Image (cartoon, coloured by chain):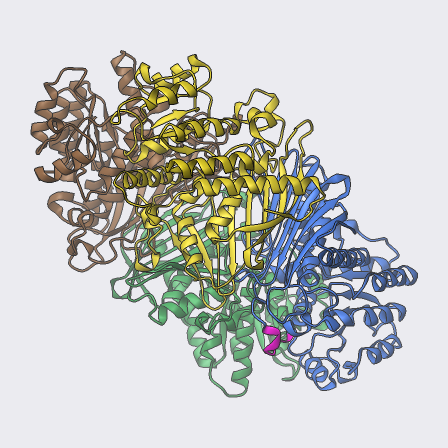
Chain colours: A yellow, B blue, C green, D brown
Amino acid sequence: MGMIGGGEGSLIGPVHRMAARLDGMIDLVSGAFSSNPVVSGITGTGEGLESSRIYGSWQEMIDRESRLPDDIRPHFIAIVTPNHLHYGPAKMALEAGFHVLCDKPLCMSVAEAIDLHETVERTGKLFCLTHNYTGYPMVRRAREMVLGGDLGEIRKITVEYFQGWLSSPVETTGNKQASWRADPEKAGIAGAMADIGTHAFNLAEYVSGLEVTALSADLHTLVPGRKLDDDGNVFLEFRKGISGTLLASQIAIGEENNLSIRVYGNKGSITWRQMEPNSLVVMWPDKPFQIYRTGTTFRDAGVAAPMHTRLPAGHPEGFIEAFANLYRNFALNIVAAAEGKSNDIMVDYPGIYEGVRGMKFLEAVVASGLHGSARTAV
Amino acid sequence: MGMIGGGEGSLIGPVHRMAARLDGMIDLVSGAFSSNPVVSGITGTGEGLESSRIYGSWQEMIDRESRLPDDIRPHFIAIVTPNHLHYGPAKMALEAGFHVLCDKPLCMSVAEAIDLHETVERTGKLFCLTHNYTGYPMVRRAREMVLGGDLGEIRKITVEYFQGWLSSPVETTGNKQASWRADPEKAGIAGAMADIGTHAFNLAEYVSGLEVTALSADLHTLVPGRKLDDDGNVFLEFRKGISGTLLASQIAIGEENNLSIRVYGNKGSITWRQMEPNSLVVMWPDKPFQIYRTGTTFRDAGVAAPMHTRLPAGHPEGFIEAFANLYRNFALNIVAAAEGKSNDIMVDYPGIYEGVRGMKFLEAVVASGLHGSARTAV
Amino acid sequence: MGMIGGGEGSLIGPVHRMAARLDGMIDLVSGAFSSNPVVSGITGTGEGLESSRIYGSWQEMIDRESRLPDDIRPHFIAIVTPNHLHYGPAKMALEAGFHVLCDKPLCMSVAEAIDLHETVERTGKLFCLTHNYTGYPMVRRAREMVLGGDLGEIRKITVEYFQGWLSSPVETTGNKQASWRADPEKAGIAGAMADIGTHAFNLAEYVSGLEVTALSADLHTLVPGRKLDDDGNVFLEFRKGISGTLLASQIAIGEENNLSIRVYGNKGSITWRQMEPNSLVVMWPDKPFQIYRTGTTFRDAGVAAPMHTRLPAGHPEGFIEAFANLYRNFALNIVAAAEGKSNDIMVDYPGIYEGVRGMKFLEAVVASGLHGSARTAV
Amino acid sequence: MGMIGGGEGSLIGPVHRMAARLDGMIDLVSGAFSSNPVVSGITGTGEGLESSRIYGSWQEMIDRESRLPDDIRPHFIAIVTPNHLHYGPAKMALEAGFHVLCDKPLCMSVAEAIDLHETVERTGKLFCLTHNYTGYPMVRRAREMVLGGDLGEIRKITVEYFQGWLSSPVETTGNKQASWRADPEKAGIAGAMADIGTHAFNLAEYVSGLEVTALSADLHTLVPGRKLDDDGNVFLEFRKGISGTLLASQIAIGEENNLSIRVYGNKGSITWRQMEPNSLVVMWPDKPFQIYRTGTTFRDAGVAAPMHTRLPAGHPEGFIEAFANLYRNFALNIVAAAEGKSNDIMVDYPGIYEGVRGMKFLEAVVASGLHGSARTAV
C-alpha cells in the first residue's frame, strides 16, 4: 500500500501502519506522509521506504505511483489525513486506478460524499472506510445475532461514546490531534459528532442492520472558546419506528474511549463495550445471562467472530487487532477482486456507503442542533 | 407507624415494613393494608397487630387513630398504595396531625402536589417521599463531593434507569404490580416515567443540587396495547445552562433495576450504579481513578456516607438498607421535631418539595412527548 | 429470643439483632448483653426490653428465663460473645431447654465441640451456627447445582478469604473487635483461621457437600507482636481424592471482606464472590458462560435461591439479608419442631455438625502449621 | 530474525511473528519452521521468504545462516519449538554468533539451563526468554511501584494461573498443542507447572524483585491417562521470609487464560489480572482505591508503563502488544549492543537468568510434589 498522511506527530498514522503490518499481508511501499517534505522524508525513511517512493505531496504521489508497473505500484492507497484532506486524495486515487482505504469521517459534506460514491461506482474500485470498531470479534458476533433474529424484533438501540481528553482547551496548547479537530476548516461542520459521533452512528447501523431515518440533536460546546461541538445527545429514529439514542462527549473527564452499544429486542438483548471488547453480554427474560467471549470455539459461538480472531480465549485482543481486521478484510477482498470474484460477505468492511451515511448523519445532527433539536430527516 | 396499603400481593409494602423494622426504631402499630377488609385483616394479623388497629379503609384508620391518646397513636402514617391513592390519604393524615411518609411519585398532578405542599406547610407536619435511592451511602458521598466542589463546575449529568420486566404485556396476565402501573386511572399520566423516571430525575437533582429548568422528551409505548409510556429519553437543561440526559425504559430485556448517574465537572467526574451500590468511581484528568466504598472509615471518606452505613466495608449493604436509611432519617427528624429541634441536615430525606418537583417533571415530560419533543419548561 | 453478648461496642451483636428483626418473625425479649451490668442495661434499654428481662450475667439469664412460663420465655437463645464464651452458655441453655443459635467458631476445642454435639443430641434441641455466608441466595444456588450434578464430578475446590483490617496492630489501639480476636485466651488456638478461615472451610464443605479429610497448612503471623496467625494457606484434601486450597489473610491491605469460592467439575464450574453476592458465574467448556442472579424467577433458576430472596432481581440483597436468612430458617424449623415436624431441608442452616467440623479444621490447621505443613487428618 | 519452529498448526509461532512484525523493527528473513521440510516450505513461502532461506532442519539453518554476510544474516534467532527443542538450537545458535530469543520454559533440566547460561556468558550474546506477560504496561507499572517502595515492605505474594483447555484428554484427539505438552519426552518433567506455572513464577519474581528460596508443592493429574501434572498448588517462600502461593491449573473449566498477581505490603497492595490487563488496582488502608490504566499520561503514571504503551488510554492493548514489547525491547538492546552500549534497564526483558530460575522452580516443584509436599529449596 501507499499512505497519504500519518507523518511524525500523527496518532492514527502509526495505528494504521501497525494494523496493516500485523497479519503480514500488506507492505507499505510508498507514502506522502506530510505536506512538509522534510517530515514526509523522515517518516518514510523511518518506515524503511526507498527514497524514490517518499513524496512531498499527495498529488505527486498518486501521479507517480499510478504510472509504475503493475507489480510495483501499490494495490491501494491509505488516506489517514485530517478530514479536509480526504476527498481530494480519495477522488484522485480512485480515478488513478487505486483501491482506497480512508479514515473517517469520509469527507466534509454530503455533496462530497455523493461525489465520491459516484466515483467509486464509476471506477469500480474498492473503498474501505476505517470505522475500526466494526472489526472487533464481539461486534461481529453481535451483528450476527441481531441479523439472525436471536433477539427477536428490535425495539431499542442505545449507543454512547464518551471521552474526556478535550475537557480542557488542549487545542490551544500545541496538541496536534486536538488542533485540527477543533478547526472547522480542517474538521468540518462538527467536532465531537464528527470525530466520535460518526463511529457510534456507524456502530448502531452496522450491528442492527437498520438505517436511521430521522433524528433530534442537542449539541453543546462546553469548553469556552471552542468553535465546534464537544458534547451532544441525539434521539434516533430507525426504520420500522424503532427508537434509539446516541450520546457523545469529549469533555467527560476520566472517560477514556468509552464506546458502547446496547440493542434490545422483544426476545433478548445484547451489550458490548469497547473498553472490555472481548465480552458480549446477552440477556434473556427467561434464562441466565450469557457471555460470549472472543476466542471461544464451541459450535454456538457463531462463524463471524472466529473469522476475526487470532488467539484462544483469554488472550486479550484489542484495538490494533480490530483495526487490523479491516485491513485484512480489505486486502482479502482486493485479492478476490483481482481474481474476478465478488466481495466476500464474511470478511466485510465499512465502505463508501457507510461514508455517505456518516456525512448525512453529520449534516442532520448539525442542522437539528442549530434549530432547537428539531426533528430532522437523515 | 401506621400503614396504608401494602396488603398481600404488594411488592413495596413488605419492603417498607422491612425497612422500618431494620433499625429497631419504628414499630408498626396499625394499618389499612387493603380496601378489601379481609386482605387487610390477613396482612395485619400476619404482622402481629391487634385486631382493633387493623382497618378496612384508610379513612376509618386515620379518623380512629387520630383520636387515640398520644402515647398510643402512631407518630406517622406510611402510604404505600398505588399512585392514585396517595393524595387523599396524605392530605387527610396531615390534617389529622400525623407526619406522613409516602411512596413516589407524590400524586397524580402538579395541582395535587401543590395542594399537598401547602398542606404540609400549613400543618407543620413532616413529610417524607421515599425516593429510596438517595438512601445509599455512596449516593450521599456523591452528593457531598459534588456540592463540596470536588468536581469543579458541573458540566454534564447523565442518569439512566433501565428495567426489562415490562417487556411483555404482563399487566394482562394477573401481575398485580404491572396492572395498576399500566392503568392511567391508577398510575396517572405516565408509565415508565412515573414509575422509574421520577427516581432518576430525583437522583439527578439530589446529587447535583441543581434544578432542571426545561426538557425535551421522546416517549414510546413499545408493547402493543399498553396505554402509557414504557420507554423514553429526555434531554435535560439544568440551571446555569448545564445539560444532561435521562433515559428510562421498562422494556429493556435483561436489565434488572439498572439505575445509574454520572456527573461530569471541569475538574473530575463521578459514576454510581445502583446494582453495584457500594462503590463510587471518581475520575480525574491528572491522577489515577479512585473508588470510594461503603464502610471505609478513613478521614477522606467524608461524613455523609458513614452516617448511612451499618457495616464495615466489604459487607454488602443493599436496597433494603438504603430504604431503611430514609425511615431512620425520618424517624430521627420526627424525634427532633418533638423535641423542638429543627431538621438535621446530615440525616436528610426527600420530602414534599421533591414530590412537587417530580410531578412537574412528569407533566413536562408528557407535554413534550405529546408535542414532538418540544422544549418544555419544568 | 434472648441474647447473650452483643453489648455496646460489639460489631456482631447489632448485626444479629438486625438480622433477627428483618423478617418480623422474631422478637428480642431478654438479654445478658455484657458481663458489665451497666453495659447490659444500656443495651437492653436501647433495645426496648423490660428491665426485668435484662441481666448482668448469662448464667442468671438462662436460669431465670428458663423458669418463665412457656408463652413468655424465649424460644431460643442467641450467643454472640467472643469465642471463649460460646461453650458455657450454649451448654447451659441447651440443658435449660432452649434452642440455641451461636456465632462461629463453635467453641475453643474439639473436645468442647464434641461435648456440645452430645448435648444437642441428648436434649433434642435445635442448634444453629451462624456461618452466615451460607445464607446468600447464590450460595444456595451453587450448592444446588453442585449437588444436583450440573458440574459433573467435582475435581477442584478453591476458597479464599482475604481481609486487610488487621494489617497493623490495631489490637493494641483499643479496637474491641481486634483485641479479643488477638488474645488466645478469648479467641482460642487460632487467629485468622478461626475468625475467617472457618467460614471459608464451611463454605467449601457446604457448597460441595464434601468433607475435607486431610490438610497441610502454612501459617504466618506477619504483624510483629501478634500472638496468633494472621495469614495462612492450606492445601485441602476432600473425600474421593478431590483437592483444593484455602487461602485466608487478615493483613491483605485493601481487601475488605473478600470471600470467594470456585468449584471445578468435569462438566462445568462455578464462581461466587461475597462482595458481589448476587451473581453466580457458571462456566462451561462448550457454551457461553452463564450468570445466575439473585431474584430472577425463571424456571431454570432452581428452587433454593428463590426461597432465600426477598426482592426482584437488581435490588441488591446483602450481608444482613443473608444473615437474616439463617435466622428465618432457624425460626421456621423451631416452629416446625414445635408442631412435631422434622427439619425442612429447603430451609436448612449450619448446625452443631458444622461446628464440630470447624473445630476439627482448626486443630488440624494449627497442628500442621506447627509441624512444617505436615499432612494432617481432619 | 530467523525462526526455528512455528510451522503450520503451531499456535505460538504465528504469535511470535505478529509480535515481531508489529512495530516494524524486525523482519523475518529465514526459518526452519518444522522438522518436516514440506511444512517448513509451506510456512516459509506463506511468510514470503526466499526459498533459499527456508530450511528443513534447524542445524542446517544455523549452519548456513551463520555463514551469510553480516548485512544479510539475521541478528537473532527466535526458537518457538516444543520444550525439548530449545536447548539444542539455542546452544548452537549462540555459538554460531547469533543472539537468541527463546520460548519458555528454557529447556528440559537445570543442568541444561546452567549450560546455556554459561554459553550466553561465554559468547557474550543476548538472550531473551519470552515470559511475555512481563511485557504488559501495567505489569511494568506494578514492578515499578513495588521496587519503588510504594507498598512498603512486601508481606505476601499471590499468583494464580488457571486455564481449562486441558480439562478433557484433548491430547488424544489430535490437538497439536496438547499432544506435545502431555508428552514427557517433549514437555519435560512437568505439565501445567512447566507450561503456565513457570509464567506465574516468573511474574511473581519479576514484579516483586524477590527470589523464591523454597517451596512446597501439591501436584495433581486429574485427567485419567495423562502422564504429567495438570493442576497444582504451591506454597512459596521468598527472601526475607516473605510468603506466597502459586496456584496453577489447566483443568479449570471455563478459565481461559486467567493469570493474576497480588502483592501485599505493609503500606498498600496491588492486583493485576491478565484478562483485564490494562488496569492495575492499587489499594490503601487509609484512602480510596486507585486504578492505574494503560495509556494515561499524567505525571504520577510512572515511566515504565508509558514506555510499553502504543495507544491512548481506553484503546485496549492486549496479548500481542505485550508480546511485541519483548521483541521491541530485545531489538532495542541488540541495536544498543551493536553500538557498544550496555543494556537499557528501562526496556528490559526476561533473559537467561530467568530461564535458569524457571528450571530450578520446576525441579523443586516436581521434587516436592513427589515427596508429599516436602519443603524443597529452589
B267 above or below B220?
Answer: above
Residue B253 horizontal/vertical position (percent) = 53, 62
Residue C377 horizontal/vertical position (percent) = 29, 61
Residue B163 forms part of the magenta stretch: no
User: At 72% across and 84% down in the image, what residue appears?
Assistant: B41
Tally the numbered discs.
Answer: 0
Query: In which image quadrant can residue D153 be found?
Result: top left
Residue D377 horizontal/vertical position (percent) = 23, 38
Task: Left or right? Give the position of B275 relative to B107.
Answer: left
C27 above or below A30?
Answer: below
Does residue D317 appear in this view? no
Residue B175 forms part of the magenta stretch: yes
Q: Kindly give the residue lying farthest to the bottom in the view shown.
A: C340
**The N terminus of chain B - image quarter:** bottom right
Query: Is C100 in front, or is C291?
Result: C291
Does residue A279 appear in this view? yes
Residue B244 horizontal/vertical position (percent) = 68, 45
Task: Left or right? Give the position of D206 relative to B80.
Answer: left
Identify the magenta region: B170-176
Query: Is C166 in front, or is D257?
Result: D257
Query: In which image quadrant can residue A290 be found?
Result: bottom left
Q: Kindly give the residue lying farthest to the front in the view shown.
A: A122
